[in-house]
Amino acid sequence: MKEEKIIIGKDGKYPLNGILSLPENIASALPAVVLVHGSGSHDMDETILKVNKPFRDIGEYLPTKGIAVLRYNKRTFTYGRQMVKEKDFPSFTVKDETIQDALFAADLLRNDSRINPEKIFIIGHSLGGMLAPRVDNEGGNFAGLILMGSSPRSLVDIIISQQDDLLKQSGKLLQFLINKQFASFRKKFDAMANMTKEEAMNAKFAGPNRMWYLKELEDNPVAKFLLPLEKPVLIMQGEKDVQVTADKDFALYKEICAGKKNVEFKLYPGLNHLFMKSAYGTIKNIQKEYKIPGKMETIVMDDIAEFILKN
């Protein structure tokens, strides 16, 4: 494998550093994949608590199977503090945060003579997986989509589910504190449905973040972009994932995609949201779990490679 430093969107307002990983020897135009991060401000490796780097794992493994991998720093990782101070920040959405840069990444690959432009795929992890069908719809035009640890539910529903699960696993004192803190969030969520765009842009959710970010996501549900797709889709889920779960999220994907022959499903026993071995399997201990150094399981990356190479 060899790695090349690249810049995503180098002619735009927010150029981003990235890495293109390639096989050492290239005999013909390669299939390639763009990696799209989950929620939060992530570097190109999607580093979690300094020790786990699932995107680096993919970037180092897939080239051994003849597949190029493009990963890059997320816009909010590099420019988050700057963007919050800009006058148009109240209108900030996933389009600004994620979608535009994923499209820049796909274009960069299409303009590389070593890459087969008809064999460019997208891997979205967590929120990135929820957005992958939308990225494809907005100009990604990928050969296929891989959704890892994602959900067809809204981000608001997922946040509420995570809080409910945390409450069930906590003692009485912690339950009291969580309920007190989360009560204001629930009121905001309830009010969001009836907000105009302008009202949502002016209503703060947490810190400088505006309700418009969440409302815009609600107005563009995953199914809206996923269900019309006829190209290959692989939906992957860790059975011990506590951020999105097999019984709620993976099961719902199966339900809404019933009868769609272009969609494959893979469930991995014992693996968590990072597709690494789970040590705790509870949301109460999620920080402890992610502080344990690990690697994405080889079987997961082998399945990704197989999906890309056969399509």
Image (cartoon, rainbow, N blue to C red):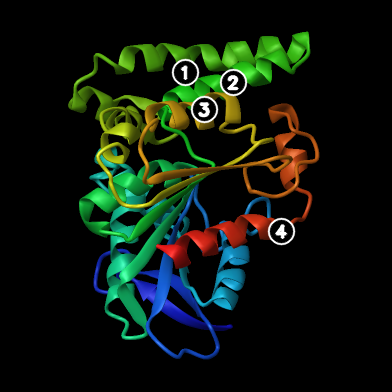
* Residue indicated by mark 3: 251
Residue 205, percent across and down? 41, 27
In the image, which disc is placed on residue 295?
Answer: 4
Q: Nearer the viewer, mark 2 or mark 3?
A: 3
Amino acid type for the residue under numbered disc 3: Ala
**Quadrant of residue 240 in the image?**
top right
On the rendered image, what quadrant is the N terminus found in?
Answer: bottom right
Residue 109, percent across and down? 33, 74
Q: Earlier in the sequence, mark 1 or mark 2?
A: 2
Amino acid type for the residue under numbered disc 1: Phe
* Residue indicated by mark 1: 185
Residue 189 left/right relative to 241: left
Residue positioned 61% across, 62% down in the render: 302
Task: Give the distance between the C-alpha atoms of the residues marked 1 and 3, in whole angstroms.
Answer: 27 Å
Q: Nearer the viewer, mark 4 or mark 1?
A: 4
Amino acid type for the residue under numbered disc 4: Lys
Q: Earlier in the sequence, mark 1 or mark 3?
A: 1
Amino acid type for the residue under numbered disc 2: Gln
- Per the image, label 3 sits on a secondary structure element best described as helix
**How many residues crowd around disc 3 within 10 Å: few (fewer than 14), some, or many (20 or more)?**
some
* Residue indicated by mark 2: 163
**Quadrant of residue 289 in the image?**
top right
- Per the image, label 2 sits on a secondary structure element best described as helix
Mark 1 touches mark 3? (CB < 8 Å): no
Mark 2 touches mark 3? (CB < 8 Å): no
Q: Nearer the viewer, mark 1 or mark 2?
A: 2
Task: Give the distance between the C-alpha atoms of the residues marked 2 and 4, in whole angstroms.
Answer: 27 Å
Residue positioned 71% across, 36% down in the render: 286
Q: Earlier in the sequence, mark 4 or mark 1?
A: 1
Mark 4 touches mark 1? (CB < 8 Å): no
Instruction: Determine if residue 129 is in view.
Output: yes
Task: Give the distance between the C-alpha atoms of the residues marked 2 and 3, in whole angstroms.
Answer: 20 Å
